[in-house]
Amino acid sequence: MRTTNQRSTLPVPPVAPDPWDDLVQEDRVHRRVYTDENIFAREMNNVFAATWVYVAHESEIPEPNDFKLAWLGTRDVIVTRDEESVVRVFSNRCSHRGASVCREQRGNASQFTCPYHGWRFDNRGQLFGIPGKNAYGPTFKARDMHLSRPAQVASYRGFVFATLNPDAPPLVKHLGNAARYMDAWIDYNGGAENLVLAGTQLFRLACNWKLIWDNAGDGYHVPFSHQSLLVMTHARYGGGDMTYFAEADRSKMSNSALDNGHTAIDQRAEMHAESAWQQQRPQPGREPYQDYVAATYGEQAKRVLDTTVGAGMNINIFPNLALIGNQVQVLQPTAVGETVMHWYATRRKDVDAQVNTMRLRTQEDFPVMGEMDDAANFEECQRGLFNHPEDEWVDMSRHYETGKDVAAEDGIIRGLVTTDLHMRNYYAQWKRLMQANPTLCLARGKL
C-alpha cells in the first residue's frame, strides 16, 4: 500500500490594491494629487508634519529674544532665540482657547501675551501668567498648559528644521547625500557663519504647492517660459545668463536625484565656466560697481564679482526648502489650491556694503523678472487641472525611457538637466510618506 503526503493549502486572499499606486505611477501622476482637498489634508500630516520641514535660518533671529513666524504646512509656529541664545520652536496656538499668541511676522520679545484672555508665555513657550488663576482648581493645575513643541528640532549649518514625528531619523540622515550640495552652496557664500538672510518677497499663488515644487528641478522650461527675458537679453546685449539652456541637453549641466526626495540642478559647469559676472544681465550701477571692485580688491576682483552672482545650483530639500542662486525659497501651503512662496535675499558678512548692494541688485533679476513667468504658469496649470477632470494625468516621463538617467557616486542618480528625474524622485518619496501611518506628537511639559 502506497501512501502519499498531501499538503493542504489555504487560499491566499487577494492583496488589496494600494490607492496611492493608482495616483502616483513611475512616469505620471493623477491630477487629483493637485486638486483633492482630502489628499491635501493628509499631506499636512504625512508630509509637512511627519518629516523634517525647514522653518528658519539662524541669521533671522541673531539676538536673544528675537523671533519669527514659520510654518509646518498649515501649522504656524514661532521660532525664537531665548535669553540663553537657544533656538526654540513652539506652536502659535494658545493652550487655552486656541487663539494665536503672536500676530507679528518677526520682532524681539521676551514674552508673548494671548490677546484673547491675557495668558502669558515666555519665549520658550512656557506658561507663566494666568489672569485670575485662583478660579482654576487642582485638576487644571495638574495639566501641562505650556505652548506645545514639535517632537524634534534640529539645525544644519544654520538651517533650522522641525518635525512632529518622534520616530523621524536624525536630520543629517534625512538630508543624506543632499548635504554635500548644501555644503557647497553654503561654502560658496562664505560659510555658515557668514551667510545672512536679508529680506523677503512674498508671492501668494492660486496653485497647489507641488506645482511650484515640480518646477524647482525643471531644466526643460527655461527657453520657453522665460523666452521674452532671453530674447530681450540677446537682442540688446548679445547674450547673457541662462542662454546655455537653449541647447540644454548638449550642455554640461546636470539634474540629480538625491536621498529622501531631495534633488539638485547643477549649472556651475556652464554658468561659471569663465565668469558668471560677465554672463549676467545688466543691473543698475553695474559699471561703477565693477570699477569699484577692481580698484578695491585688486587680484581678487574676479572672485568678488562672481560672488555677487548666483551659486549656479538649485538645491531642493523636500518638501519646502530650495536654495536657488544666492537666494532661499520656502513654500507655505495654505490650501489645496493656494500657496505662499517666500523668496529670501541673502548677504555676506565678509564683504562691504557696495558688494552686498550689487548682490541684491543681481537677485532682483530673479525673482522679480523671471518668477512672474513661472507664477503665471503655475496658476494656469492649477486652473487646467481643476477645470478638466476628464484629462486625468500629469506627465513626468521626460528621459524616463532614454537611459540617460544613470547611477553616479554616493547613491546619486544623475541625468540631463531637462530630465523629469526631479519629479519622479520626489513623488516616490511623497508616495512613501502618504502610504505611512506616522506617529505625530507634541511636547508640552515644563522645560
Image (spheres, rainbow, N blue to C red):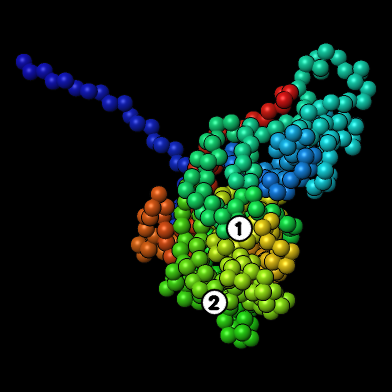
Helix, strand or loop at disc 1?
A: loop
Where in the figure is residue 36, as x and y percent of width and height?
62, 50
Identity of the amino acid at label 1?
A: Asn
Mark 2 or mark 1: name the one nearer the start of the chain: 1
Q: Where on the picture, by quarter, is residue 2?
A: top left
Q: Secondary structure at mark 2?
A: helix
Q: Considering only vertical position in the picture, is 49 above or below 425?
A: above
Residue placed furthest toward the right: 132
Query: Can the viewer see residue 316?
Result: no
Residue 138 in the image: state x and y as whole percent: 83, 13
In the shown orientation, is residue 76 left or right of residue 33? right
Which residue: 90% across, 32% down? 118
In the picture shown, does residue 213 fall above or below 268? above
The tally of labels here is 2
Residue 106 at x, y percent in the picture: 80, 47
Residue at image x 52%, y 69%? 272
- Residue corresponding to mark 2: 243
- The extreme top residue here reads 138
The residue wearing badge 1 is 189
In percent of width and height, residue 6 lies at 19, 22
Q: Name the residue at 77% across, 39% down.
A: 64
Q: Residues within 10 Å of mark 2 (few under 14, many from 20)?
A: many
Q: Is residue 284 above or below residue 175?
A: below
Dot label at residue 420: none
Q: Residue at x 42, y 73 (%)?
A: 250
State the residue in front, 76 or 380: 76
